[in-house]
Image (cartoon, helix red, strand yellow):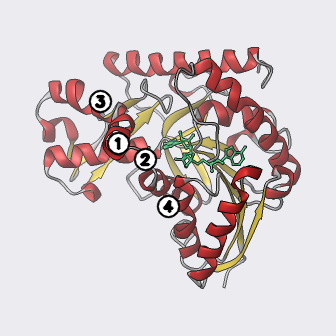
Amino acid sequence: ARTPVTVTVTGGAGQIAYGLLFRIAAGDMLGPDTPVRLRLLEIPAAVQALEGVAMELEDCAFPLLESVDISDDPWDGFSGANVAVLVGARPRTARMERADLLAANGPIFTDQGAAISASAADDVRVLVVGNPANTNAFIAMSNAPEVPAERFTALTRLDHNRAIAQLARRTGAAAADIARITVWGNHSATQYPDLGHATVAGRPAAGAVGDPAWVRDEFIPTVQRRGTAIIEARGASSAASAAAAAIDHIRDWTLGTAPGDWVSMAVPSDGSYGVPEGLISSFPVTCAAGEYTIVPGLEIDEFSRERIDASVAELESEREAVIGLGFAKHP
Ligand code: NAI
């Protein structure tokens, strides 16, 4: 058997974690040969519920699951973490403005970034799921001087997977036949799901769709508003699909992407595609040997440029807001 991997998950008693933890323990995230040690972090009020989740994990008798530890202290919860999935966050409540949401989440991700920096394993890889995910990841990164900045990422894989699903439904193709979808920008309504480089069974998606108006008027808004549509239908926000996307994100980052394909991850920009350096924005990436690379040299037409710029402008305004609140400094 291989060396065990320590995975810390925050928000362990929440609904995404309930879809996530059992799949991690079953080996879906790190592969069928890798034993897992789970460390679950919650706020004090949710520790009792978290104990129940830990009991259920125990009751599955997963062969790969070596241990489950629970904590309400980030300084303890990230100790030795090789993978950290930051799901717990302060949710947006009625009449809360975006600025209030940033202010409520700033202290959480300031502390967690510092705790990761001080106590996680040297190879720690961080995925932020809790919203506003990109900017929360930016705050954690800014407060983790001991961790290379590129190890901080945020989840846009759910948006990516939703885009695959919409294109598959429209063309009648299987999800497995679709490649090279890209989600650019922020995990928010301004995100830009881009079919410009996508293929369906090896053919350009535009030809397979045959209707540019569908892309503009149906595909893009449907993907952008899918989270809201799920809330309206289910009465609760996406949970199992978000958990599946988090599994996909870490699995592909650590084990690699399929040849000829790429995935979307929000990662600190290196200046590619005109995105200001250091901003955590979604890009097309390939992964190999535990490292991701932003896909270089894609042609960006005027339609795409406008949409990428709009989402990046939103990310820049979020960055300015959290710098103004003292959660990060100017680069
Ligand atoms: P939930 O409310 O069911 O669970 C969140 C859990 O986090 C709660 O148990 C809460 O006690 C815990 N928590 C809050 N602050 C914490 C802290 N400082 N440390 C540790 N735990 C803490 O919410 P759910 O449905 O699991 O969603 C979690 C987050 O994921 C939300 O912010 C949601 O908006 C976001 N999300 C992101 C998606 C993405 O694609 N990036 C998709 C869907 C949801």
Name which residue lies at 35% across and 22% down. 304
Name which residue lies at 42% across and 59% down. 258
Write down which quadrant ligand 1 falls in. top right
Q: Dot 1, how many residues are within 10 Å of its Cα: few (below 14), some (14-19), or many (20+)? A: some
If you read the primary sequence from the N terminus, does the residue marked by circle 3 or circle 2 appear first?
A: 3
Mark 2 residue element: loop
Q: In this view, does 35 lie to the left or right of 71?
A: left
List the residue tagged with mark 2: 238
Residue 288 coordinates in the image, percent (x, y): 56, 57
Distance between mark 4 and mark 1 Cα atoms: 16 Å
Task: Tell me which corner region of the image, top left, top right, bottom left or bottom right, holds residue 137.
Answer: top right
| Residue closest to the far right | 118
Distance between mark 4 and mark 3 Cα atoms: 27 Å
Name which residue lies at 25% across and 33% down. 219
Amino acid type for the residue under numbered disc 4: Gly
Amino acid type for the residue under numbered disc 3: Ile
Q: Dot 4, how many residues are within 10 Å of its Cα: few (below 14), some (14-19), or many (20+)? A: some
List the residue tagged with mark 4: 19
Q: Is residue 284 above or below residue 50?
A: above
Quarter of the figure that contains the C terminus = top right
Q: Nearer the viewer, residue 213 or 229?
A: 229
The answer to whether mark 3 and mark 1 are in CB contact below 8 A is no
Distance between mark 2 and mark 4 Cα atoms: 10 Å
List the residue tagged with mark 3: 220
Q: Dot 2, how many residues are within 10 Å of its Cα: few (below 14), some (14-19), or many (20+)? A: some
Mark 4 residue element: helix
Mark toward the viewer: 3 or 1: 1
